[in-house]
Each structure stands twice: as C-alpha cells, then as structure tokens.
Amino acid sequence: MKDKKLRNWAELPSKLTSSILLRLGAIEILQNAQKVCKPWHRVCKDPSMWRKIDIDNRNDRAAFKYDLESMCRHAVDRSHGGLIEIEIWYYGTNDLIMYIADRFCFSLALFPC
C-alpha cells in the first residue's frame, strides 16, 4: 500500500460520477449521495440525473421513515422539465399525480396497492 496513491472520489470527472450515482435510487441520492461533497452535490442537482425517477419503497422498510411524496416532488422539480419516466410505488396520491402532470409530459407507471 506504500506505493499506491489514494484516490479522491470527489475529483472524479462529473460524467463518471453521474454514471455511478445513477445506479443509486432517488432516496439514496436525496438522502445521502448529494451530501458527500460539493462536486457530488452539483452532479446530483443536474437535471439529467432526474430524467427517470423511481422511488421504490416496496422492499425497503427504512424508506417509510421519509416523506416520499415530498421527495418525489423535489425530484420532479430537479428534472427541470426533462422528466421522461416516473414510477410511484404505494405512496402516490391524486395531488402528487396532479403536481407531476401539471409540470411535464411523461410516461407514468403506477403500481397501486
């Protein structure tokens, strides 16, 4: 380990960082990844990160501790009109659907209880 140089994840090119972060879910990005450092926060705010939104709470009991509807609205706002697809799992309300519909044309996939 003496000769190996440690890498600073904050110094990755933003394109590579976004490629990595896109593998996370919206909850992980909004609650954790964007708080790692300023470069990651910048990438997480980029509208291209929010073209597809999937806030999947089906298998994650911890997700229920969050205000998922508020998080979804925040993610939709971050897309700045670039939203193409959104999936809402078990927390979608009529108000949330109207909020999304009032802002964008997109493909909506709803999976109600």
Image (cartoon, helix red, strand yellow):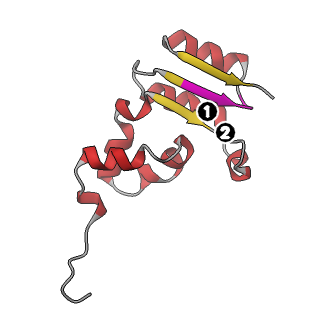
Q: Which residue is mark 1?
A: 70
Secondary-structure class at tag 1 = helix
Placement of the C terminus among the 4 image quadrants: top right
Disc 1 residue type (three-letter):
Ser
Disc 2 residue type (three-letter):
Asp
Q: Position of residue 46 (x, y in %)?
A: 34, 35
Horizontal placement of 100 versus 64: left or right?
A: left
Q: Which residues are magenta?
A: 86-91
- What's the mark number on residue 67? 2
Residue at x-position 44% and y-position 52%: 33
Q: Separation of disc 1 and disc 2 at Cα?
A: 5 Å
Q: Position of residue 55 (x, y in %)?
A: 60, 37
* Most foreground residue, 93 or 22: 22
Q: Position of residue 61 (x, y in %)?
A: 74, 51
22, above or below 3, in the image: above
Q: Position of residue 108 (x, y in %)?
A: 59, 18
* Most foreground residue, 11 or 38: 11
88, above or below 100, in the image: below
Please indicate, yes or no, whether residue 41 appears anywhere in the rendered image: no
Q: Are marks 1 and 2 in contact (CB under 8 Å)?
A: yes
Residue 82 magenta-highlighted: no
Horizontal placement of 79 versus 58: left or right?
A: left
Secondary-structure class at tag 2 = loop
Residue at x-position 50% and y-position 44%: 30
